Image (cartoon, grey):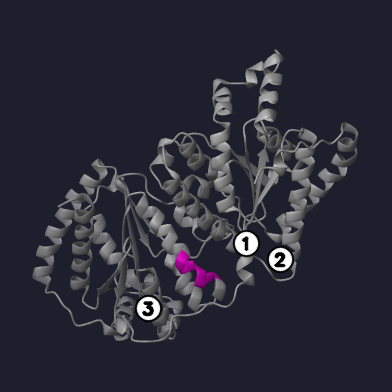
Amino acid sequence: MFEVAELKNRITKQQYDREVSELRTQLLDVQQKLEIAGLPVVVLIAGVDGAGKGDLINTLNEWFDPRYMCTHAFSQPSDEERERPHHWRYWMSLPPRGRIGVYAIGWYGPPMADRVYDRIGNAKLDAELVHINKLEKELADDGMLIVKCWLHLSKKQQENLIQKLEKDPETRWRVSDVDRKHLKLYKKFVGIAERVLRETSTGEAPWLIINGYDQHYRRLTIANHLIERISARLEAQSNGFSSTAALQQKPTLVNNGPSLLSSLNPELKLGKSDYQERLALCQGRISQLTRRARQRKVSTIMVFEGWDAAGKGGVIRRITQALDARNYRVIPVAAPTDEEKSHHYLWRFWRHLPRDGKVTIYDRSWYGRVLVERVENLAKPEEWARAYSEINDFEEELTDHGIILVKYWMHISKDEQLKRFKEREKTSYKRYKITEEDHRNREKWDLYEAAVNEMITRTSTEYAPWRVIEANNKYYGRIRVLKSLCDAYESQLGG
């Protein structure tokens, strides 16, 4: 893979000076166009030590307008980062639409370093690369342009550069013991790098591999590559192809069949006295179990979806009554803000993930993509169709981190919903909960029911199963939720 990249390429100072002015103008021009088009761009610079990664990143910061770009070089994760899934810090740094994010090695750094130092084997490395491919595909499908550049050197070239730096008193400081150690590991590192690049050079995010020995050559080559990639995407976008997903076929939908929701028994009930007794017991268990989870630094995410007036808020209040107020957050999810719209739809949920031992409760969630956005045509068919696998990947990453993830669909009948709407309209302090949109949504009940059935079918996994709660009787529904929550904690933490 690296044979051609080990061939030294040179550009004379005169040629460089002739070309650089026009090249910088073109870079600023495409940067302005992507700002207007709302195209987000990630530029990932990686490669062997001494190949000029730092010089190239500094050059891009000089040549681009710094107001519309940001640069990220990650070191060891902070406590805050360690307490969340390992891709969290990358999601939080992603550029909004119209901006450029430049990454030094980025999400490739930790798995490659772990493999070089034998902290993981090839199987674990391959698993990490699968996650990286999924991440990059999600971003590309959402319209992000990902440009990945690998700066390579032969071992002899790397040795020559280190010797040259060490001989000059003014540059000797740039050579560290780590650089000398990495030189000894050159063969092993290159073998791992070849495996990584081979597995992650995809149609959505291919690698460009060049020789980085000559600074003039690498600067001009990467700049020209950026201009070509950005210009090609802008042209495709102007022709109606905003992402790789636009080239895919229309989604294949789950066939209509027996409805899961229609098979539920809405008549299940619990009397008030039994409810109050069981409520106290469940809340006591929840209090003890969440304290145990906090001691073990196990975080929890609770997701509540359901029909309007199905009782999501009521059951959330019964849960939070049992929690330490310092230990939880309730995130009520409404229409996305302008900031949230400028990112991938999952970004606003990544940003609220709890630290170790904490609890986050989502009152509606990322499932809006396959429910309201699907039914109300707020997302294109190819967007909500691919969201099922994106959500499954997202939830798998959460549970792989050790997060307890529980998902509830609060189900009531159409008649029960109308009854509750009328009751709310009669109660002064509940009237705000009822809007014209709530009544309008009832007209699309069948469409929403089909969407819910498909959502449960395609996203109820062994690591994040759905719990469908019959909630026509509020007492019964609340106890079902609280009891299943206790069961989930005890399964994860031990009885």
Left or right placement of residue 392 versus residue 262 in this view: right
Q: Secondary structure at mark 2?
A: helix
What is the C-alpha distance between the residues marked 2 and 1?
9 Å
Residue tagged 1: 143
Amino acid at dot 1? Gly
Toward the viewer: 13 or 279?
13
Question: Which sits earlier in the primary sequence, circle 2 or circle 3?
Answer: 2
Q: Amino acid at mark 2?
A: Gln
Reading the image, the residue beneath label 2 is 237
Q: Which residues are magenta?
A: 383-389
Amino acid marked by disc 3: Asn
Residue 78 sits above or below residue 203 on the image: above
CB within 8 Å, label 2 to label 1: yes
Specify whether 441 is left or right of 475: right
Residue indicated by mark 3: 453
Query: Residue at (76%, 64%) from the top-left corner?
Result: 235
Looking at the image, which is closer to me, 436 or 358?
358
The numbered mark, 2 or 1, whose residue comes first in the sequence reads: 1
Instruction: Report the front residue among 238 and 106.
Output: 106
- Work out how far the residue at label 1 is from the one at label 3, CA to CA, in angstroms: 28 Å
Q: CA distance from mark 2 to mark 3?
A: 34 Å
Picture coordinates of residue 210, whole percent (x, y): 71, 43
270 horizontally vs 331: left or right? left
State which tag comes first along the sequence, 1 or 3: 1
- Mark 3, other Cα within 10 Å: few <14 / some 14–19 / many ≥20: some
- For disc 1, the neighbor class at 10 Å (few under 14, some 14 to 19, many from 20) is many
